Amino acid sequence: MRTARACNGFTYLGLLFIITLMGLVAALAGSTWRFTAQRERERELLFVGREYQRAIGCHVKAHAAQPQPYPTSLAQMLASPGELTVRRCLRRLYPDPITGSDDWGLVRTPQGGISGVYSRSTLAPLRQRGVYVGDGIALSTAKTYQDLKFMGTLPTSVANGLGGSSEGEPPRLAPPTDYGIER
């Protein structure tokens, strides 16, 4: 009779050990899944940020002769109304992959145009080396995703071609230096 009770106690302890071990494995799997999901969202942020960066540069190039070549809204880069040929610098408005919202932080020029975008997330980036995101900003210098500014700068050909002293050329347009960050 005593032997049966002793076996029941060992079975109970063995079952508790197995349940504890399963809980630890589940916690580790959850942590790994969260890390993997954030890494994928970060990769998507770099893609989307570069798309906005490219689209702003495309918009500036297409509207270089205008006094305000930078778009005043993100939707303005979807199509160019009033022109004979439709020129899309951006296929669609992308949501921020980190926050999941359409509310991007906007870097504005002194004239009110949008010269760059950034995520409003305060999370720290996972990648710390090897990725440069335009305008000299590297991931290694970013403390949060808000520090990553995807700037649509003037293409060199446009910056050099604007404002010569020849007649008929538009005035020289300098890329914005005093950024007003909209929060």
Image: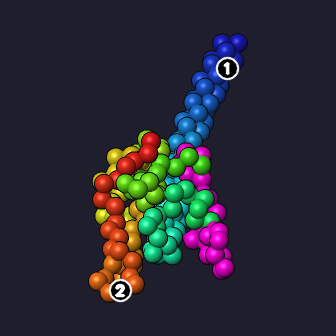
The C terminus - image quarter = top left
Q: Position of residue 90 (x, y in %)?
A: 59, 68
The span picked out in magenta is 79-101
Earlier residue among tags 2 and 1: 1
Q: Label 2 belongs to which residue?
A: 167
Q: Is residue 66 above or below residue 113?
A: below
Amino acid type assigned to the residue bearing label 1 in the image: Asn
Determine whether the residue tagged by mark 2 lies in a helix, strand or loop.
Answer: loop
Q: Position of residue 54 (x, y in %)?
A: 49, 70
Determine whether the residue tagged by mark 1 lies in a helix, strand or loop.
Answer: helix
Of the pair 21 and 104, the residue shown nearer to us: 104
Magenta stretch: dominant secondary structure: loop
Q: At 47% across and 45% down in the image, what residue appears?
A: 120
Q: Is residue 18 above or below residue 50?
A: above
Of the pair 51 and 32, the residue shown nearer to us: 51
Can I make out residue 128 in this image?
A: no
Q: Label 1 belongs to which residue?
A: 8
Q: Position of residue 26 (x, y in %)?
A: 59, 39
Q: At 57% across and 65% down in the image, what residue appears?
A: 77
Q: How many neighbours does mark 2 have within 10 angstroms: few (below 14), some (14-19), or many (20 or more)?
A: few
Quarter of the image where one finds residue 163 = bottom left
Q: Position of residue 53 (x, y in %)?
A: 47, 65
